[in-house]
Image (cartoon, rainbow, N blue to C red):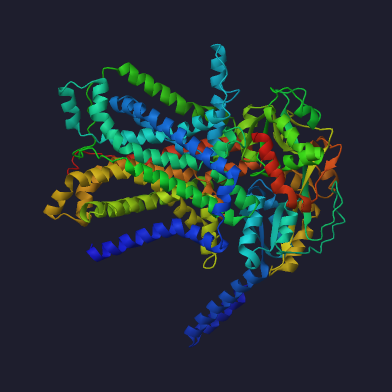
Amino acid sequence: MAHSPAFKRTNTLLNTWAKRSALAFVFSALALNTGLALAKDTLTVYTYESFTSEWGPGPVVKTAFEKTCDCELNFVALDSSTGILNRVQLEGPSSPADVVLGLDTNLMALAEDTGLLDVSEVDTSALDLPIDWTSDVFVPFDYGYFAFVYNTELMPEPPTSLEALINAPDDVKIIVQDPRTSTPGLGLLLWMKSVYGDDAAEKWEALQPKILTVTKGWSEAYFSLFLNGEAPMVLSYSTSPGYHMAIDETEQYQAAAFDEGHYLQVEVAAVLKNSKNKALAREFLAFMLTPEFQTAIPLTNVMFPATDIGDDLPEAFTKLITPAQTLLIDTATVRDNRKAWTNEWLDATTR
Amino acid sequence: MTLRLTQALAAALLLFVASATLLPLAALIQQVGQLSVVQALSDVWIQRVIKFSIWQAALSTGLSVGLAIPVAIALSREPRFIGRQSLLNVFSLSLVMPTLVAIFGIVAVYGRTGWANGWLQQLGLPEFNLYGLNGILLAHVFFNLPLATRIFLVALDGIPPAHWRLSSQLGFHGWTRVRRLEWPAIRAQVMGTSLLIFALCLTSFAIVLTLGGGPRATTIEVAIYQAIRFDFDLSMAVSLALIQLFIAISVLWLGSIWKQEVPMAFSSLSAQDQWRPKSRLRSLNVLIIFIASGFVLLPVVGLLVSAIDPAFFSVLKAASTVKAFVNTLLVAISSAILCFVMALGLLLIARHCHYRLKLQRTSQAVRLLGNVILVMPPLVLGTGLFLLLRPYADVFSLALLLVILINALLALPFVLRILDAPIHQQAQSHDRLVQSLGIAGWSRFRLLDWPTLKPAAGLSMGIAASLSAGDLGAIALFGSDRVTTLPLLLYQRMSSYRLQEAAVTAVLLLLTCLLLFTLSQWLTKSRSKDVNP
């Protein structure tokens, strides 16, 4: 539609003697148009693979945001949240990304250290998180707790605390992920650390006989082993049963509530300092906290929304466990100690 | 083709393969400036990781190759039973199963609650514990036994019918026939195949971690992943990659001490002749084939069982499935063709160096070049390529092209291994004659090389195509949602908790690989006897 005046004009010009210059005009007009469209209107968001998949929040978010912004939202899917950080680190100041979406509380300090991120300028008063939000760079979009999910058919009475799990008989088997290669794996490492502090190594040693195996990632643990009936319990999220209840309509898989409390993961997004569309990028960060974005989260990303969405929260999510206490080690401490704690875990579990 | 053009093409090919495999590493080295090889080697933990990587790879290789020899001999001695070709095709599927799917199948059969333990329990036998060295070895044999068997089978099929007849007239049976006829044919392939499998096991990642039972079982590849993804310590990652490369090349060098004896065979131009002397121990053959098939096929069956569901066909019909299926075929077929052309080119260059220029070392180096990619960690390759290409192009819009290219390179070692024997044998027996008759270039290829190569070409294209179809690494590296292939769709469905759909996708992926295998076999089959060179 927008091109029709140009075409009309072309037609009249074509009837005159200046055929060549007319063609040149058309081409330059077209080039200018597309050039403007690209420069003005595309927001590039780096995120992780499952966010952009057909069943993830990506497609819903794209449609909803493009309605409000008159722009094109372009997701670039990377293999993991650490993959997103790696990519902007490699690209440095010339990164084509405007927004990074999908980092978490454990990566925040590392990400800020790169000096590539800018303040969000987003009003975060609508947030409804289990903790107070203080960062002015990162805007949370969802959260979840790490938890052990169990198969009620294989394990009618799950342990009720981390301590009980550690002291359980050795034939109680669990599957966990490796903290060196997976987000939940790192989550458990920090969970143990925040509960046991300096005694964590000892407790890992006591837990070791119960660990059937340590997988590379969540998919191997959950799909290849747990749902195959290989062990009654797997490290996952407290929200996992929400999906099974709402979509698969089964209550067979539940999360065990532990007395010591559960370790929190908040997923965040931030705008890049060298973004060429900073205003639009900030608009997107603010959009993340609107109901359009937030109501898509529970069933597409299988996490809790970062704001109160009232009755829009699927019923299954109201049946999920509420941790007795929210555990979280601040991001700078994680950055400073992650390597040492990982080594401590390695020593304890390979002794 | 003029000589000059041939030379230019050869040089371009060598340069291309060398730069695609080595430049990414060089780019990373340049980026980090200083390497930390010494620091890595002095770390006690890294030392343990290196030792473990080598140890498990050596054991896995020994088992896979050792067991493949009797299986290949049994299959070769039973050349015509119903479903033999289909069995061989299904046999090759284990090699191309995405790790996650293979783990699923293996656990369904050999896990704590798997079928095998159910049977053991009924027989009153102790439980088999999958997790630990057991599991690593079992999985690696599952992946590599079929590969080795197929390579050895090609070698056995290369024994000229006249030799079989002679051996029959001389009354060779059982062990004597193995010693005089079959082992010499296999022997030529043993070292090369072992090295290929050793490299595959050395760089094994998710299998070792998941079935190894925990961090005690860690390969260098895990340490590289950790260094890049979690620590963003590129210097450490590159150093570890160099150490891995060094180990692989040392092993290769050790391997070259073993004299490669090429069987003194007149390469059979009518390779289709399937005549074999009667085997006296047919029941033993049948038993070996039965056990091997059971071992390889059960995990596939385990996966099938879990995927059969009322929703099976609706998942197959979904638009996303169809799109991913088409993309997968496109990627697989293009990279198989590219790979075949590259492999053939490299081998013809190697042959020229070996027989005409008498440069044995150079000939070996050319073949080695195509194998380097085996031990190049995917993350290092991906990161390096990204750094290389970024200043010149939009990496994301090139995604499909890069995926085809990388998959072709990744399949190159397999295709080289399979095509090597026929080309070598051909040259061994005909090169002087060819030279004196002045047959060269295209006519030599068409009249002499192609008829010998045909059966091997089918197998190698099949393997290359299905390896590419099943690969996730290359596509995940460049992070684009513009190209979805079946393995990627599988992971996406899984991480969105769509587990049933993921299982169906996995089955479709296997069927696709089977289709590609059958297709390439069919395309290279001699359909009429009048193709007489």
Image location (x, y in percent) of residue B137: 50, 31
Number of numbered markers? 0
* B484 or B76, nearer to the observer: B76
- Decide: is B503 above or below B330: above
Image location (x, y in percent) of residue B2: 22, 64
Whether residue B313 is visible:
no
* A220 or A33, nearer to the observer: A220
* A28 or B90, nearer to the observer: B90
Whether residue A92 is visible:
yes
- Decide: is B152 above or below B444: above
Image location (x, y in percent) of residue B57: 47, 37
**Is A56 left or right of A9, judged from the image as shown?**
right
- Decide: is B91 above or below A265: above
Q: Residue at x 25, y 66 (%)?
A: B4
Q: Residue at x 53, y 20 (%)?
A: B116
Image location (x, y in percent) of residue A154: 70, 23
The C terminus of chain B - image quarter: top left
Q: Residue at x 37, y 46 (%)?
A: B253
- Decide: is A94 above or below B351: below
| Residue A10 occupies quadrant | bottom right
Q: From this viewpoint, which residue is outermost toward the left?
A: B437
| Residue A184 occupies quadrant | top right
Q: Residue at x 43, y 30 (%)?
A: B63
* B212 or B312, nearer to the observer: B212
The N terminus of chain B - image quarter: bottom left
